[in-house]
Amino acid sequence: MTISPSPRRAYAAASPSHRRAYAAALWALAYGALGAAWALGAPGYPWGASDPDPDGALSILAWTTPRFGWAVAALGLLTAGTALALTRRNSRRAPLFLAWPIAALLVLVIPDSRLMMGVAYTPLLLVAPAFGWSLGGATFADAWPWPVLNQLVCVLGGLLLAAAALARAGGQARGSWFTPERGRVAVYVAVAVPLVYCATRWAWALGFPLGVSEEFLAEGEDGLWLAGAYLATFGALGGVLTLGLVQGWGEVFPRWIPGLRGRRVPPLLAVVPAGFVSVIITVAGLTYVRWTVAGRFSLAEWGAWLPECFWPVWGAALATATVCYHRRRRNEAPATRPGR
């Protein structure tokens, strides 16, 4: 008599690639069930009239109603089936061709620029009480309302599916494109692209109308441009950290970090945040590209929108640099690793 293993033991015995696929399938079934609940009248539908999206300009789903939950449920079933198909080695390549578009939809299309704003302002909200800053009464609830948290949930599902697809396609020759040389070029691009945005926001904070009119500059004298300068500084510091993907201090902790000096930097310590930032930067940039195509901007005010249109280039370069860094660290000789 054969006794089937429990689901927990079966999951534990599965390969890492299969675990990612099972996690993506579980996410898809749960989110699909949530979509069906919204369609049946459950509260919490994150788009349409319930989304605090000014004039419906941010989200591509601003036009939808809770009945759209049925489409969400259908997408959940399709995603779950695709993820489970990735675990079958004897299946054809169709699951990969489905997995990538679905992952791109969840990671790059459904979210909007508010996801980046929430991430960027979270450190400021954390330190504000210590310095007595009121920030105009802004709270975490303002930075992370449910519609924005829902975007984070969608990105999580898309990344799970992408990870499963990558594991399925692992070991194929196309991965050799991510060489250390391309990684170095990508890092330089990722550092250079945001500097135009930084220059405009720092100039506005200092009272110089770089790329905008005097009237436009006057509209933000109540502190708006200081917030813009904060975001610019946040981006510039991110550029400095990006250099760690090709510098020695990105592999070994420098001397000035007590308790860690001389130790190897765990690759995921760099890969996870850099990969996530590449996603939210790309998403924010695509929002501005969409607005530009729709004719929402004036050429005379180029400083307010043109630098952001290059953010997808920034995000793609950062993602490329991150993959190259991960591959280089993964291929380290065992003798160079600590404890060997």
Image (spheres, rainbow, N blue to C red):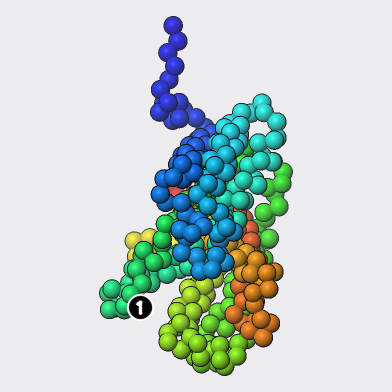
- In this view of the protein, can residue 279 be seen by the observer? no
Tell me the quarter of the image containing the N terminus.
Answer: top left
**Residue at 60 percent of width and 90 percent of height:** 213
Label 1 crowd bin: few (<14), some (14–19), many (20+), radius 10 Å: few
State whether residue 320 is above or below residue 98.
below
Observer able to see residue 180: yes
Residue 24: image location, x then y, percent:
52, 40
Nearer-the-camera pick, 26 or 260? 26
In this picture, residue 261 sits left or right of residue 105: left
In the rendered image, residue 50, in percent from the top left (x then y), is placed at 45, 58
**Residue 257 is drawn in which quadrant?**
bottom left
Does 128 sit left or right of 231 as displayed? left
Residue at point 51%, 57% (across, down): 48
Residue toward you, 57 or 100: 57
**In this rendering, would 45 be left or right of 279?**
left
Q: Could you tell me residue 210's position as x and y percent? A: 60, 88
Say if 221 sits above or below 332 in the image.
below
Residue shown at the point (52%, 84%) measured from the top left:
202
Residue 251, horizontal then vertical, whole percent: 50, 59
